Image (cartoon, helix red, strand yellow):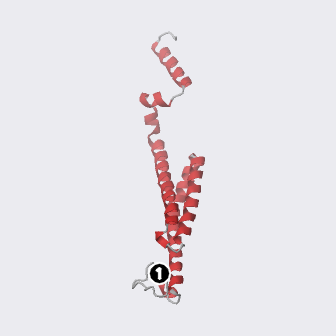
Amino acid sequence: MGKDAKVPLAGYPDMGAGKYSKLLPYGDWYRFNCAQRIHMNSIEHLSWSLPLLLVGGLFMPRVFGLMGATVIIGRELYRYGYMTNDGPNSNIREAGAIPLNAAEFFMMLAVGGLALQYLFGPFFGRRNFVKRFTMSKIDRKIEYVRDRIKRGRPIE
């Protein structure tokens, strides 16, 4: 970043604005291209995380509201850290990237779980093993009474 810093031959990190940014001093050119990288990374992630937020938010609004807040805060920390003098090696960027990526990963798992529940929920819901752990005391008592009536035995 100093006056004696050598410009890389390929001009890393250049996102295709080299024609216009060749007129900039190296420090401005570097910051400009870092800002472009942040922008493109945000677009790439938001293109699939926003639909996950929408679908998941319909079924679990509180959980996905928290995930959305984590994504927004993580994205801002990522941007701020990337624009510091440390650039891509910034600890602030990492502090934003880790919870951001974890929230996106958990959103994928949750929406995938919702899809599996929709597809296979009735099948597993009819299994006695699942019923034993998911039924309330009242539901178990009703099931017991129905079973006793069905078999013609007296209700205790």
Does residue 103 appear anywhere in the picture? yes
Q: Residue at x 53, y 78 (%)?
A: 31
> Is 119 on the left-hand or right-hand side of 75?
left
Residue in the foreground of this view, choosing between 17 and 85 = 85
Q: Mark 1 belongs to which amino acid?
A: Gly
* Whether residue 124 is situated above or below residue 62 in the rendered picture: above
Q: Nearer the viewer, residue 41 or 139?
A: 41
> Neighbour class for label 1 at 10 Å: few (<14), some, many (≥20)?
few
Q: Residue at x 48, y 59 (%)?
A: 98
For label 1, the residue is 16
Q: Residue at x 53, y 20 (%)?
A: 141
Nearer to the camera, 58 or 12: 12
Label 1 sits on a secondary structure element that is loop
Relative to the observer, which residue lies in front, 116 or 4?
Answer: 4
- Give residue 50's position: percent from left, percent from top: 55, 59
**Residue farthest toward the bottom in the current orientation of the protein:** 23
140 above or below 53?
A: above
